[in-house]
Image (tube, rainbow, N blue to C red):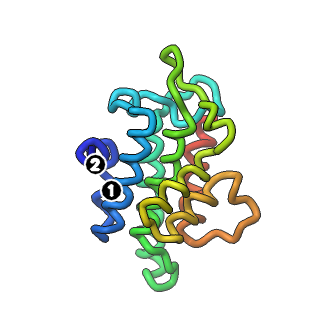
Amino acid sequence: MKDLVTRLLPEIGEITDDKLRNNVIACWKDAIEFRGWSEKLLRSIPFTLLAENVKITFIDHVRAVCRMCIACNDVLEEIHGANKTAVNRDYLIAGALLADVGKLLEFEIVDGQPQKSDYGRHIRHPFSGVGLAFKHGLPSEVMHIIATHSKEGAGEQRLPESIIFHHADFIDFELVK
């Protein structure tokens, strides 16, 4: 299963802290196993059910947003210096890779079509994502990114990593919507 996760999300290799990287992989393994997602389904489901005819897949969305976060951090460090932005790169990458992992609990396939599950109608992905992250010992800063990345984070004071992720996520989402 570790091979599947790293094949789907090669950006996991950008996390320099071994324990953090392994805990991110463990969260993904749990989410995949919850509904028995196959690699084929993971590579084909849309990243959102909130828009019609979404052509961007779930995995491509997760990877694109993660890479936008990395690029944004690189630019900020290059121009402003690493000490001025106070971004923890590993936390940023881990949060970017885990922000939507709860969708694997929120979604299900019925008659070949992705739809919101009964579970998903009651618990949105930021909450289940935080639950998975907590279960696997992720730092509170990473859980903060997961918790505050969507509408649930409106009005909350976001950490720098969450600010970057929130905007990168909505760039990808708004372009599709």
Q: Residue furthest top?
A: 111
Give the label on residue 33, or none.
none
Is disc 1 placed on a helix, strand or loop? helix
Mark nearer the N terminus (1 vs 2):
2
Does 90 appear above or below 119? below
Q: Residue at x 64, y 45 (%)?
A: 124
Is disc 2 placed on a helix, strand or loop? helix
**In the rendered image, which quarter is residue 177 located in?**
top right
In the picture of the structure, the residue carrying the numbered disc 1 is: 12
Residue 16 drawn at (x, y percent): 29, 69
Q: Nearer the viewer, residue 97 or 117?
A: 117
In the picture of the structure, the residue carrying the numbered disc 2 is: 6
Q: Residue furthest right?
A: 155
Q: Is residue 1 left or right of residue 164?
A: left
Residue type highlighted by circle 1: Ile
- Which quadrant is the N terminus positioned in? top left
Q: How many angstroms separate mark 1 from mark 2 (CA)?
A: 6 Å
Q: Is residue 171 left or right of residue 153?
A: left
Residue 122 drawn at (x, y percent): 68, 40
Residue 45 drawn at (x, y percent): 47, 29
Q: Residue at x 44, y 68 (%)?
A: 91
Other residues around mark 1 within 10 Å, as few (<14) / some (14–19) / many (≥20):
many
Residue type highlighted by circle 2: Thr
User: Mark 1 touching mark 2, by CB under 8 A?
Assistant: yes
